[in-house]
Amino acid sequence: TILLPIEYILTLGMQEGIFREFTRPSARVMALTIRNAIDGFTIELMRKPHLDVQEYTRELVTIFYKSTKSNVSHRRITMIYYEVHCYSCKKKVYEGSLKYKQFKERKSRTFCCDDCGHKIRIEAIKNFFR
């Protein structure tokens, strides 16, 4: 689902000591809250076209910083994650996403994003009829 990458980031951040402790259900709640805040921003922007985007963003960052920060002193952390690249357009797909999972389940070890796959199919059809 759309929440998996957010839950994954929260879990990694917790394991690295960047974020506070989360249980599996509480990480899901936080991921859902973050997702709803993103979606809510879009709705608010449609309702108020002259919304101060910087102020709105600053407030969201403050809210989530305070609600996720760890009490442990911070140290420099390097995040490690897996990604695959479309062989045609070089678009990235990250671990935790449905597309990444589908790539891992296939026997073929090349990845082509939906957009490029569609373009390739269209070109093949055009060339067939020439």
Image (tube, rainbow, N blue to C red):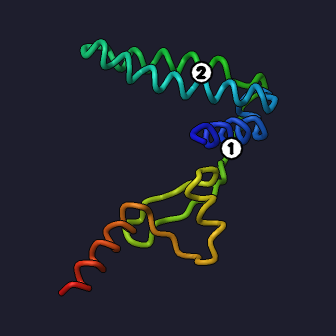
Q: In what quadrant of the picture does the N terminus appear?
A: top right
Q: Cβ–Cβ below 8 Å for labels 1 and 2?
A: no
Counting from the top left corner in percent of width and height, residue 73 is at 75, 28
**Foreground: 108 or 84?**
108
At a point 68% along the width and 35% down the height, the residue shown is 10
Amino acid type of the residue that numbered disc 2 sits on in the rendered structure: Phe
- Write the residue at 64% across / 77% down: 107
**Residue at image mark 2:** 64
Horizontal side of 107 relative to 70 (left or right) equals left
| Left or right position of 26 against 31 | right
Placement of 50 over or under 1, stated as above or below: above
Task: Compute the Cα span from label 1 to label 2.
Answer: 19 Å
Instruction: Tell me the quadrant of the picture where the C terminus can be found.
Output: bottom left
Residue at image coords 70%, 37%: 13
**Vertical position of residue 97 compared to residue 128: above or below:** above
Residue 93, percent from left and from top: 52, 57
Q: Total label count?
A: 2
- Foreground mark, 1 or 2, reads 2
Q: Secondary structure at mark 2?
A: helix
Label 1: state its secondary structure: loop
Q: Earlier in the sequence, mark 1 or mark 2?
A: 2
Closest to the observer: 113 or 12?
Answer: 113
Count residues near mark 1 (Cα–Cα under 10 Å), then give few for <14, some for 14-19, many for 20+. few
Q: Position of residue 36 (x, y in %)?
A: 53, 23
Amino acid type, residue under disc 1 in the picture: Ile
Which residue is the site of mark 1? Answer: 77
Q: Is residue 86 left or right of residue 77?
A: left
Mark 2 crowd level (few <14, some 14–19, many ≥20, 10 Å Cα) = some
Q: Quadrant of residue 129?
A: bottom left
State whether residue 5 is above or below residue 26.
Answer: below
Residue 94: give its label. none
Q: Nearer the viewer, residue 32 or 129?
A: 129
